[in-house]
Image (cartoon, rainbow, N blue to C red):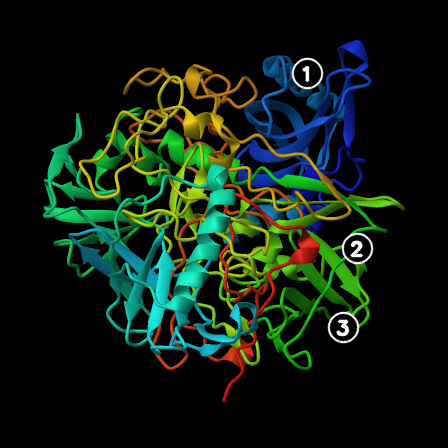
Amino acid sequence: MKPWFLMYLLCVALCSYGQNDPWPKEILIENGGKIVVYQPQPERLSGSTLSFRAALSVRQKSNAEPVFGVFWSDAAVSDNGQTLDLQSAKITHVQFPDSTINDVSNIEQKVEAQIPKWNLKLNKSDVTAAVQQEQQNMAPDFKTDAPKIIYANKASTLVLIDGDPKIEKDKNINNMLRVMNTPFLIVQNPDDKKYYLYGGGFWYVASSPLGEYAYVKSLPRTIKEMDKQIKEQEKKDKSKQEESASSPTAIIISTEPAELIQTEGEPTYKPIQGTSLLFVDNSLDEIFKDVNSQLTFILISGRWYSAPSLNGPWAYVNADKLPADFAKIPPGSEKDGVLSSVAGTEEAQEAIYDAQVPQTAKVDKKTAKCEVTYDGSPRFAEIENTSLKVAENSNITVMQAANGKYYALENGVWFISNNANGPWEVANERPQDVEKIPPSSSAYNTKYVYIYDNTPTYVYMGYTPGYLGSYYYMNTIVWGTGWYYRPWYGYYYYPRPCTWGFGMHYNPWMGWSMSFGFSAGWFSYRYAWGGGWYGGWFGPPAFRPPYRPWGWSGGYYRPGGPYYGYRPHVTVNRPAYVNPHRYVNDNRYARNNNVYRGSNGVTTRDVNRRPAASTRPVGGTRPAPGNNYRPGNNNRLPGNNNRLPGETARPGTNPGNNNRLPPSNNRPPTHTTRPAPTPNPSRPAPTRPAPMPSPSRPMPSTRPTPSTQPSRPATSPSYRPSQPSSRPMPQSRPSTMPARRH
């Protein structure tokens, strides 16, 4: 690997503020090693203090591979009218994707010592403009409207259909009729004309696609043959599956964005030590009761909602407007998993830091290939506030730029062509204005895929978790933009990324993962026929969100890592035994969703995002400010220099802007009841499929018309959902099944 991936930290808009100072800067260290510091990016100017961040790479020996990271610093500057002279700098935080740096404090000292010797003179007007742009990027236009929130007090599974059911023949299953616009397997039996739903190892039957589904044990001949093939494939994939459900559940169908919260029987409550909060302990969901206000709070897709009761009505609550006791939930306790979604906590800041660490790859210009297909002739629609147009009817994201070039993005690799139909070759640059794509566009996640450098043979690319659906918002990270993106439905059905319906949960060990309530295995099987359910629902075709392990909701922030001793009072489909170390030691549950892996012509190394939890304090105790206790030697906040003197709390970071670090909110917040946050690697992991609204139905945040809605990578309506932990080769992207209108 070369010192390329952190070139994304350099913003085009800022390239002139230090144009008289050549970048990057090199610092020679022991054993022939070298530190490379890339051009800083201003975040805040307050009096004589300039806060900035910069990329760096460290080669500890002459023959060692470089390790890339980011550091944040507060610098003393003198104002000379048109320029700012940088006099000294104090590093406040360092973040590396891997815990491979032996002595981070030594690296910090060397960089701090060298910065004044560079005699940096910064153009004041450019620095001021850069800081203003940072502030504008801190609050993306995300939607916070509550989806349809369904409460059930018995074991249930939410099945999402993206609008009115689109029923077409599926050539992969002998031309049986299938509901195409859902990631779930719903087929019509040609003999009795009934609809059969498969999931969690069980079959359910209804008289219509939206009817009341009931568990069925005795299957008709055609469905029985299908079940046999499914079971055979499941047996082959047994080592890759989660704990299977032991009994069927109730089925809830939704044709609009929805989330399911449930308890086993009437809710039972348990107090959280040192707070006035209660939590529901007979549920696998995050449900709390604030004794002082008597309001019920739930956490879904990283967003908080409150209501007088579990039956609603639900109102959005900003993560920094929660009752103060949420920030007092003890680390290592049963419900500490929600701390990453409470603004101002260390855990929230760790998640924000991690959301800035990219997964990188070296792409071979000769062997990396891209295939784009359109449902008919290419149809492009403008992306508002940009010079770009996006294809509505393509199987992956394709954009037309103002320069007449076409750019396709497949599994984190940019391709370019002079024609919408190709041929395609690896791109050396991103399309202009990609960083301006708004959240209202389904192409929004493409702004988090960067091109860092290129040679005659290779192009170095990478993406931050925003590409997979994890975004900074209101001083925490959330899943999805909250916008509803209309799918493309013509001869083929192409879904779009969604926020709701998959029970997305975040924790520092697994990142984002999906939950199906009391049941598992709905998407953990694959079929003998080709295709898959995943492409498009979660963004990149190769992305597989893992399941959240049954019963895991706390004990993440404790010495030794997650603790499975906290198990909810739920008996339905409760696994007989779970290895308490399984999800800590097993990569399948530790956020290794690197979409570059398996791609032809792409060389990559997984970013290690696991927290070194053994360095955490015991129980609810917190270190005094200045203790460098953060997980991993290279992921810490040194000393008390965690903020500018006398400044108020910094907002959280806003993921990615054109080839640079996400904006400046990534500094530890101040004036909280907890010590300044510090980094802890983690990575996004997705959740379960949410229902999507029908074009004919009013939807929360619905986009205007299909013609104005950009399209996303295609999914395969083909009949078999793939094992989330396995991912296909990029060339074998999910096939899209015909969905012809009659």
Depth-wise, is mark 2 or mark 1 nearer the camera? 2
Q: Earlier in the sequence, mark 2 or mark 1?
A: 1
Q: Position of residue 580 (x, y in %)?
A: 36, 24
Tell me the CA gap for discs 2 and 1. 38 Å
| 375 relative position to 63: left or right | left
Binning the other alpha carbons within 10 Å of mark 3 as few (below 14), some (14 to 19) or many (20 upward) gives: some
Binning the other alpha carbons within 10 Å of mark 2 as few (below 14), some (14 to 19) or many (20 upward) gives: many
Binning the other alpha carbons within 10 Å of mark 1 as few (below 14), some (14 to 19) or many (20 upward) gives: some
Q: Residue furthest top?
A: 31
Tell me the CA gap for discs 3 and 2. 15 Å
**Quadrant hosting residue 553:** top left
Mark 3 — residue? 421
Depth-wise, is mark 1 or mark 3 nearer the camera? 3
The residue sitting at 71% across, 23% down in the picture is: 58
Q: Earlier in the sequence, mark 3 or mark 2?
A: 3
| 124 relative position to 324: left or right | right
Q: Are marks 2 and 1 in contact (CB under 8 Å)?
A: no
Mark 1 — residue? 110
Looking at the picture, which amino acid does disc 1 mark?
Answer: Lys
Mark 2 — residue? 426
Tell which of 132 and 182 is nearer to you. 182
Looking at the picture, which amino acid does disc 3 mark?
Answer: Asn
Q: Position of residue 502 (x, y in %)?
A: 38, 54
Q: Is residue 186 visible?
A: no
Tell which of 429 and 528 is nearer to you. 528
Q: Are marks 3 and 2 in contact (CB under 8 Å)?
A: no
Q: Residue furthest right?
A: 456
Q: Residue furthest front?
A: 221
Q: Is residue 407 visible?
A: yes
